[in-house]
Amino acid sequence: MSRKTLLILALVLVPVAAMIVMIAFETGNGAANNVHFVIAFGLGATLTVLLAVGLFALSFHSSRSGHDEQIGNEQDSDES
């Protein structure tokens, strides 16, 4: 794996692992002690973070590649 991929994985998985540990040691209610709850929480948090990272990456890519300007120019020419 490349260094960039490893960095992204670390930035995503370390906070998720910290949340899972915090939830697993929560003793206020019985739900946190359930293995299925911890797995579902971990998967949900991981997928949510990955979706956010992916959408931000797409928006930056669109901005850098000039697609945003092309759409703006087409709308300006249509209004004239």
Image: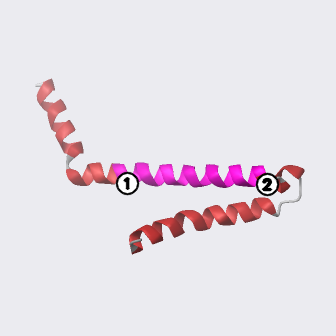
Q: Is residue 1 above or below residue 79?
A: below
Q: How many marks?
A: 2
Dot 1: element: helix
Label annotation for residue 35: 2
Give SS at disc 2: helix
Residue visible at 40% across and 74% down in the picture: 3
Image height of 9 relative to 53, above or below = below
Q: Main secondary structure of the magenta part?
A: helix
13 relative position to 58: left or right:
right
In the rendered structure, which amino acid carries the disc numbered 2? Val
Residue in the foreground of this view, choosing between 47 and 57: 47
When the figure is inspected, residue 59 is found, relative to residue 78, above or below; the finding is below
Residue type, numbered disc 1? Ala
Residue 53 image point, x, y percent? 46, 55
- Residue 73 colored in magenta in the image: no
The residue labelled by disc 1 is: 57
Q: Earlier in the sequence, mark 1 or mark 2?
A: 2
Mark number, residue 6: none
Q: Residue at position x 37%, y 54% from top?
A: 57
Residues 7 and 36: in front is 36
Magenta range is 36-58
Horizontal arrangement in the rendering, residue 49 relative to residue 63 (left or right):
right
Give the residue displayed 21% in from the left and 52% down from the top.
Answer: 65
Labelled pair 1, 2 in contact (Cβ < 8 Å): no
Among the 4 quarters of the image, the one containing residue 71:
top left
Quarter occupied by the N terminus:
bottom left
- Depth check: give the residue in front, 62 or 39: 39
Q: CA distance from mark 1 to mark 2?
A: 33 Å
